[in-house]
Image: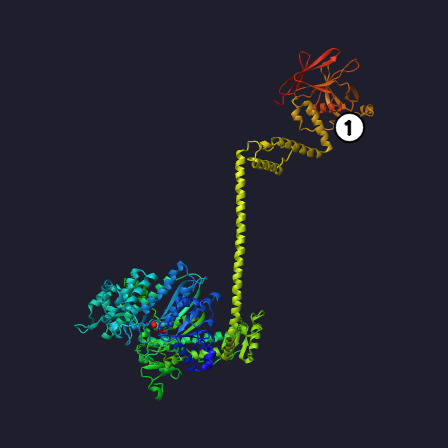
């Protein structure tokens, strides 16, 4: 032991007793060593030990101080191996696996009655309720999850010889978590409630807790309403075990807890009332007695009970009386009523009590599920707390079912542990030799096989016509199963073993041990029969809860209901399916003694459990390959200080680091294997020596660590101070800068306001800033948006101080624009413009037709050169015709109109008729030109006539008058005077004689001689 202790002590400082993981047990095939390790740890209150990842828990039967909130915190996010084994470590690892691997998990808790399964499941639930994130909204759900336990325990648990709070039903509970890991819902599946307890208890046992709780805790009002007395001794269903009170149970307190829990879960007051009515009615049923009537018939002798029953169950009293004493049978299509014998009536009564209670329990689970329901996607952790393997003096149908269930779960355990082990070696690329283990499939088949299985034989016997009985069932079993290695009866066994089986028993050799089952009651319990007329009465109940428990269709439904065993078999198959779809973790519970005592370790009892829990096999499987495995990272982290190559840090691949490390440690090739992500170590010895080296090196390490820690701490302190100094300087600078900016802004605003007030004063210190700003913004505005075109006359209004400058600027700007514009003008256009300017100088505001003429462009000539007469052109010699137009000439006398061409050269104008040059007018002699102010085409060229030869003034009419006059004026170098007369033009005719043209405005142009001998021209007025 001393050698052992040295090696074992090192894994954690706290857990120095034994090994905390059985795989580290040197003598791993020895059951004695296994049990000794358990015992030593148990002696030190170390109730938890691992086999790899399986947790073995030994019931301490006393409160240990290891379930506080601080303990929960300690196990959060911590790996299995870093800290002593605990149910919280399993809870946390499962939770983390669910969150990181996103795979549904389940925790399978097994062990025999009283080993601590239910406590373990409650501890797990509490761990999640305390450590998982929770919002206000979810805290309701968390409370409901937690409160579902006391309710289910009140109705489904009872004191047995093994356990004061034994669960008499199997329970599988899903806890659903959302993506944040917060519990958001739950669902409970319940399995086979031990209903027979309602009507009968073995010596030293009790009925379900709720009966005692109601009688002890219920208010007086309530009890009288239910017709109950506060005395359990008065009730036949509660006295069979002779054990109304248990020291470890406080029924009164529990009653309060349950009532509160029912409210938290969300039960309605009238639902609770209905439920308690049912509980009370069960007690009344128990006290319902039968006796012989006057005519020897069997009748109910307790009227009060019947009265309460009819009230509490909400059924007709007479019908109930009839149904409790008669049965309805259908023979050859005819319904017949036949009276029940005394025994039959008692059986019918008990059947009713069991049915009512059993269904109320199922209803309870359904209601709890409704209150925990969450629809939506979630991850799940399932908790299986199901009855453990059970062996009593007398074992009946219930034990048969329970032990069958354990066979199934054991098979699942074998399959999953072996499978996962094998899968791990495969995944890591490690070769492994399969381990021999006992496969209990043969026993499962013996029970559940299709035609030759126990259950199907039982069903067949229940249904067959004739007179089937428990004994005929036993005979059938012997016929069918005789010779099976795991099935024995009195008749089938030989002399030696015969004594061990009585005539009414069959023995099953379970994987966990041999169990004798008495066939008594098998058929009835399997049929789970309630006489039809009793069922009919209950189906008519006006109690809400009962009508939900018993559906009316049931009575009319012709289909034979499934037998109890088949129902159980099917629900187990479903359970296995659920568990298979999840990642399992195991908690194996062990009961250290049968007396519920603390500190007593009954080796024989423990050995038995170790055996049938398959713990040794489990260990062997775990050890067959490699006792110890660790991820490279973890391994390197722990032991890197043992090798200079890996200390203080390994830089390369992790696998290479581990290879370097184990080489340095001198591991032999057969001692370890390197997988893909893990190192596998075959013998614990190897690990222990490594641990020893680590322990030996620790003082040196601690010293190094301490030195570097102190250095680190000092440096950290220095850095903190430095950081603080820099930070405060920086903050100061920033805030100074801010203050500066703020001051500046205030200053400017103040100046602005003051400047605005003084804006009309001479420049002075008060308005300086404002005026400058104004000037600046005006100039900037001009700069950014100068006038775009010469025609755009808009100009921003300058501030008063800039009026003069603004004018200059505007002129400059215009000139600039104009210059730019002129520079862009073509020569053609320039000529045109020059002429237009001349026209404007002559006619603008003088002649009515002028505005209309402006947009019409002047042309070079109105006559083409082909239209000129060649002879005339020849006479010109060097002079060229620059402009020609067709005109009408009026004789000075008689005003006869004659068509002529007016041709202009650079020095004279001439009138041409056909080929004859009629008149030549030198510009030098042209005195002036007269035109009217109207829109007519008349003009008179005034030419002096000193001699007769010279023709005198010429009266002409033409289109394009303005153009013609402009051309004349241009060619004659603008020396010609143009007269504009509003109403008449006088011209010379001959030697002192004068002619007159009168102008008047009218609707249209008209030329006529008038009476005075004047020429009268009527012209429209185009412009007002
Ligand atoms: N971890 C534990 N610490 C203290 N007492 C325990 C513990 N586990 C079980 N017990 C005690 O053992 C009793 C039976 O445990 P329980 O979980 O009901 O057994 P099971 O469900 O396996 O039949 C509990 O009522 C409690 O008194
Ligand atoms: Mg239990």
Looking at the image, which residue is at 25% across and 69% down? Answer: 283
Spot occupied by residue 360 in the image (x, y as percentages of width and height) = 31, 66
Looking at the image, which residue is at 78% across and 13% down? Answer: 946
Up-down: is 546 above or below 978?
A: below
The reply to whether residue 70 is visible in this rendering is: yes
Relative horizontal placement of residue 178, taking residue 355 as reference (left or right): right
Of 635 and 608, nearer the camera is 635
For label 1, the SS is helix
Up-down: is 846 above or below 252?
A: above
Of 416 and 148, nearer the camera is 148
Q: What colouring style does the render use?
A: rainbow
Relative horizontal placement of residue 886, taking residue 757 as reference (left or right): right
Spot occupied by residue 923 in the image (x, y as percentages of width and height) = 77, 20
Residue tagged by mark 1?
865
Spot occupied by residue 510 in the image (x, y as percentages of width and height) = 39, 80
Mark 1: few, some, or many residues within 10 Å (few <14, many ≥20)? Answer: some
Asked which quadrant contains residue 172, the reply is bottom left
Of 848 and 319, nearer the camera is 848
Of 307 and 434, nearer the camera is 434
Relative horizontal placement of residue 215, taking residue 45 as reference (left or right): left
Spot occupied by residue 400 in the image (x, y as percentages of width and height) = 35, 77
Residue furthest to the top in view is 992
Asked which quadrant contains residue 833, the reply is top right
The reply to whether residue 28 is visible in this rendering is: no
Asked which quadrant contains residue 469, the reply is bottom left
Up-down: is 269 above or below 348?
A: above
Report the quarter where the C terminus lies.
top right
Looking at the image, which residue is at 55% across and 79% down? Answer: 667
Report the quarter where the N terminus lies.
bottom left
């Amino acid at each position: 032991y001393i050698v052992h202790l040295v090696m074992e002590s090192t894994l954690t400082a706290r857990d120095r007793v034994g090994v905390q993981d059985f795989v580290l047990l040197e003598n791993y095939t020895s059951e004695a060593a296994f049990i000794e390790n358990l015992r030593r740890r148990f002696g030190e209150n170390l109730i938890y030990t691992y086999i790899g990842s399986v947790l073995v828990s030994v019931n301490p039967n006393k409160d240990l101080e290891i379930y506080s909130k601080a303990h929960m915190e300690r196990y959060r996010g911590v790996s299995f191996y870093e800290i002593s084994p605990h149910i919280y470590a399993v809870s946390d690892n499962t939770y983390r696996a669910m969150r990181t691997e996103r795979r549904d998990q389940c925790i399978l808790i097994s062990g025999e009655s009283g080993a601590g399964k239910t406590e373990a499941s409650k501890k797990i639930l509490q761990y999640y309720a305390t450590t998982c994130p929770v919002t206000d909204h979810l805290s309701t759900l968390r409370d409901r999850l937690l409160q579902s336990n006391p309710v289910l325990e009140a109705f489904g648990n009872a004191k047995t010889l093994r356990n004061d709070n034994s669960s008499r039903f199997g329970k599988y509970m899903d806890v659903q978590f959302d993506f944040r890991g917060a519990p958001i819902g739950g669902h409970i599946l319940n399995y086979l409630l031990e209903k027979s307890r309602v009507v009968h208890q073995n010596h030293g046992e009790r009925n379900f807790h709720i009966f005692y709780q109601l009688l002890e805790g219920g208010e007086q009002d309530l009890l009288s309403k239910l017709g109950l007395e506060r005395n359990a001794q008065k009730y036949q269903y509660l006295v069979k075990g002779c054990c109304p009170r248990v020291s470890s149970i406080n029924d009164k307190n529990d009653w309060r807890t349950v009532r509160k829990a029912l409210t938290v879960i969300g039960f309605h007051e009238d639902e609770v009332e209905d439920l308690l009515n049912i509980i009370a009615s069960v007690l009344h049923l128990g006290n319902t007695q039968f006796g012989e009537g006057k005519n020897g018939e069997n009748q109910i002798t307790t009227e009060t009970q019947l009265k309460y029953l009819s009230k509490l169950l909400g059924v007709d009293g007479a019908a109930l009386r009839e149904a409790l004493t008669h049965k309805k049978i259908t023979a050859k299509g005819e319904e017949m009523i036949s009276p029940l014998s005394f025994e039959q009536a008692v059986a019918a009564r008990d059947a009713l009590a069991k049915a009512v209670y059993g269904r109320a329990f199922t209803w309870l689970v359904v209601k709890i599920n409704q209150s925990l329901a969450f629809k939506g996607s979630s991850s799940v952790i399932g908790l299986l707390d199901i009855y453990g393997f059970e062996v009593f003096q007398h074992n009946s149908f219930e034990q048969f079912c329970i032990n069958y269930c354990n066979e199934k779960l054991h098979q699942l355990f074998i399959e999953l542990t072996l499978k996962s082990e094998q899968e791990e070696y495969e995944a890591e690329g490690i070769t492994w030799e399969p381990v021999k283990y006992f496969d209990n499939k043969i026993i499962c088949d013996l029970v559940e096989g299709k035609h030759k299985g126990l259950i199907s034989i039982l069903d067949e016997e229940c249904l067959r016509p004739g007179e089937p009985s428990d004994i005929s069932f036993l005979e059938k079993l012997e016929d069918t199963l005789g010779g099976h290695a795991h099935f024995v009866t009195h008749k089938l066994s030989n002399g030696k073993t015969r004594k061990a089986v009585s005539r009414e028993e069959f023995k099953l050799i379970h994987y966990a041990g041999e169990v004798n089952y008495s066939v008594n009651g098998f058929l009835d319990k399997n049929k789970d029969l309630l006489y039809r007329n009793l069922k009919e009465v209950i189906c008519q109940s006006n109690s809400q809860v009962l009508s939900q428990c018993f559906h009316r269709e049931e009575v009319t439904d012709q289909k034979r209901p499934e037998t109890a065993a088949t129902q159980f078999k099917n629900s187990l198959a479903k359970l296995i399916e659920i568990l298979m779809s999840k990642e399992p973790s195991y908690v194996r519970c062990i009961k250290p003694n049968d007396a519920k005592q603390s500190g007593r370790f009954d080796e024989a009892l423990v050995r038995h459990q170790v055996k049938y829990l398959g713990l040794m096999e489990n260990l062997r499987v775990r050890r067959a390959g490699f006792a110890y495995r660790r991820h490279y990272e973890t391994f390197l982290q722990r032991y890197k200080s043992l090798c200079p190559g890996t200390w203080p840090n390994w830089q390369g691949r992790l696998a290479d680091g581990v290879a370097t490390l184990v080489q340095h440690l001198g591991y032999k090739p057969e001692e370890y294997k390197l997988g893909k992500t893990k190192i596998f170590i075959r013998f614990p010895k190897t690990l222990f020596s490594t641990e020893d080296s680590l322990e030996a090196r620790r003082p040196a390490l601690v010293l190094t660590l301490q030195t570097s820690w102190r250095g680190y701490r000092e440096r950290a302190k220095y850095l903190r101070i430095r950081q603080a100094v820099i930070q405060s300087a920086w903050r100061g600078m920033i805030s100074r800068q801010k203050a500066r900016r703020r001051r500046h802004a205030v200053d400017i605003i103040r100046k602005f306001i003051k400047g605005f007030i003084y804006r009309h004063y001479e420049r002075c210190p008060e308005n300086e800033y404002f005026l400058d700003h104004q000037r600046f913004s005006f100039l900037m505005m001009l700069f950014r948006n100068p006038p775009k075109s010469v025609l755009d006359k808009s100009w921003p209004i300058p501030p008063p101080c800039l009026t003069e400058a603004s004018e200059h600027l505007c002129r400059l700007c215009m000139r600039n624009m104009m210059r730019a514009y002129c520079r862009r003008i073509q020569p053609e256009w320039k000529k045109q413009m020059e002429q237009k300017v001349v026209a404007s100088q002559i006619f603008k505001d003088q002649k009515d037709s002028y505005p209309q003429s402006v947009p019409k462009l002047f042309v070079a000539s109105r006559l083409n050169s082909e239209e000129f007469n060649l002879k005339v052109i020849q006479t010109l010699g060097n002079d060229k015709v620059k402009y020609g137009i067709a005109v009408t000439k009026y004789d000075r006398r008689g005003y006869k109109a004659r068509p002529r061409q007016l041709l202009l050269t650079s020095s004279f104008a001439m009138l041409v008729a056909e080929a004859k040059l009629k008149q030549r007018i030198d510009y030098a002699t042209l005195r002036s030109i007269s035109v009217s102010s109207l829109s007519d085409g008349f003009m008179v060229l005034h030419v002096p006539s000193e001699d007769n030869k010279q023709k005198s003034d010429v009266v002409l009419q033409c289109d394009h008058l303005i153009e013609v006059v402009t051309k004349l004026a241009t060619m004659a170098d603008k020396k010609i005077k143009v007269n504009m007369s509003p109403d008449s033009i006088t011209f010379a005719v001959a030697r002192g004689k004068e002619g007159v043209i009168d102008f008047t405005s009218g609707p249209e142009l008209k030329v006529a001689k008038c009476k005075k001998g004047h020429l009268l021209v009527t012209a429209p007025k185009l412009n007002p």
